[in-house]
Image (tube, coloured by chain):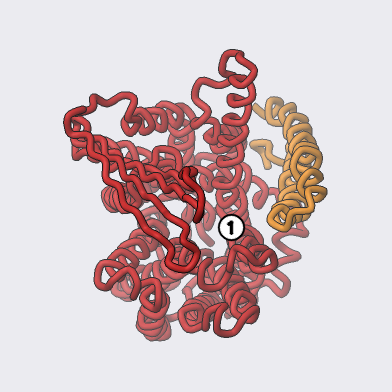
Chain colours: A orange, B red
Amino acid sequence: MNTIKKILGVVWIVLGLAAGYYLIVSQAIPQFTSHRSEDLVPAIIYTFILMPIITGGLCIFGWYALQGEYDETN
Amino acid sequence: MQESSPVDSATHKKNLWKVIGASSLGTLIEWYDFYIFGSLAIVLSTKFFPPDNPTAAFLSTLATFAAGFVVRPFGALFFGRLGDIIGRKYTFMVTLLVMGLATCAIGLVPGYETIGFAAPVIVLVLRLLQGLALGGEYGGAATYVAEYSEPGKRGYRTSWIQTTATFGLFISLAVIMLTKSSMSAEAFDDWGWRLPFLISSLMVVVSYFIRRNMDESPLFKKAKSEGNTSKNPLRESFGKKYNFKFVLLALFGATMGQGVIWYTGQFYALSFLQSVCRVDFDQTNYIIGAALLAGTGFFVFFGWLSDKIGRKPIMLAGMLLAILTYRPIFDRIYQLTDTGNKQELVDQYAVREHMEVNGETGDSLRVTTMERFYTDGSVHTAVQEEIKAAGQSEFSAHTAAGHIHVGSGVFASLVLLVFVLVLYVTMVYGPIAAFLVEMFPVRIRYTSMSLPYHIGNGIFGGLLPAVATYLVAKAQFANDAVSAAGGALANEKPYLEGLWYPIIIAGVSFIIGLLYLKNKNQNVQ
């Protein structure tokens, strides 16, 4: 089980990066450049709130998992 | 290690229900306050955020998004830190007062027509205060009750706190509907909408005086007397790997999945019935209200059960059931309300026409109401408005809208289906307060448990309506583009596409929870 937890750590890191790419490239940039006032708030939230939480959070979580921080012995 | 309660057993028993009652009542009021803003959003937008003004529209979006998503976690950090330094009791009394004052003030703010731009700005600030207060309230109440509870009954005791969010939504809908039914539509639109906000102040005063007489949490009191409280809970919670890794685990392995299931079962179901299925507005509120009322007891049941078999299996079972059955359930809801699946009583088809002429411009408005009756008792009403400018001979279509008032059999089936969705909510939400409290030590508990809870619910859950609506619109757009080109439909059921968001988020949370969470309930020390 500990080995699976560690291997999946890589998956969480990749997932975090993929989510960050999707949020910025597919969501935030088109909304920032749409020049519509109702798009501005979601774009700010994607860039400064969601992206750091999802990408940062999942990458750190994955890194901890890879390091064995969630092993049964810890 | 088994803990021994710092208060003697007799006092403990005597105080326990008082503690649960006072904490739950305050949290219930805070949820009520938070929801009436959302439930009255349409009225508020006409009073404070005129849609033809782009700046006011921007402030409206900010009020909706910022208070729901961004401010709640900040409230969790701000009040969580206070709660871990000065104590649970004083902190959640402050959150109660902030919420109550902000809510009451919203009911007193003059409209945009009276004070201009000051109106939306004041409402935005008050809404942000509501979000901040909510961010601090829940963690305090859950921690307070859990620290009073005896080992082995923490899930049951804290589950009473868990009923408050759903019950708060139910009461907000009930108060609004009662207020509406007690006056004319014009009076409600003119001043009656303020009453649900003002009623809150009475409830807050009562709750404040009840809470004021409560003692501080015994575990916090003990930690404080021994000098074991944290000087800097934020740094300790998020700056130390040992604690921070559990904050991340709580977020990704539990609250993230719980948040999307909570929002799908209560808010997306309501929005799906209203916007996608076009069910009559009042009827949708009755359907959701009945399902919530029937489901509320299960928060307590699953909280109690989590003391017996563990928090993890119940929460994960709720997530798994939701992942597997969301699409069939929502599809069934759609099929039940789709008039294409019903047998029409053709001879009862009725059309009414109403004509109005504008005395000043000479323009004519023709309103055509078409009613179709079905064998199951459902009635579909379509209203078409057409305008003919003065001097022209032809009417041109202006607006078209329709809704279905479902028959009693369909109504009962819809209540049952929404009840199943609420049941999933109770499975993931009932045990989560005890689960979060048990993950963190007393010195940083308020801070550490509040943040993942409010990110999971406020951000992952709060984002659900926007993302789900976007996914449905995108699928519909793709279908329209393909059918315009004469090709086969890209998606047979575009109305179900919005469910991929909760399914994927809950799926990731399920896998993380299954692999990384420990099953054994921990002790609160």
Q: Nearer the viewer, residue B175 or B486?
A: B486
Note whether residue A24 is visible.
Answer: yes
Task: Residue at 48%, 77% (x, y): give it.
Answer: B103
Q: Which residue is identified by label 1?
A: B454
Q: Give coordinates of residue A5: x percent, y percent.
A: 69, 30
| B63 with respect to B352 (left or right) | right
Image vertical order of residue B33 relative to residue B150, above or below: below
Chain hosting mark 1: B
Residue type marked 1: His
Residue A36, horizontal then vertical, whole percent:
74, 54
SS state under label 1:
helix
Whether residue B247 sits left or right of residue B510 in the image: it is right
Residue drawn at point x = 36 percent, y = 33 percent: B333
In the rendered image, which quarter is residue B178 located in?
Answer: bottom left
Q: In which quarter of the image is residue B458?
A: bottom right
**Up/down of A40 relative to B337, above or below:** below
Residue drawn at (75%, 65%) of the image:
B235
Place of residue B425 in the rendered image (x, y in percent of width and height, measured from the top left):
42, 45
x 26%, y 35%: residue = B372
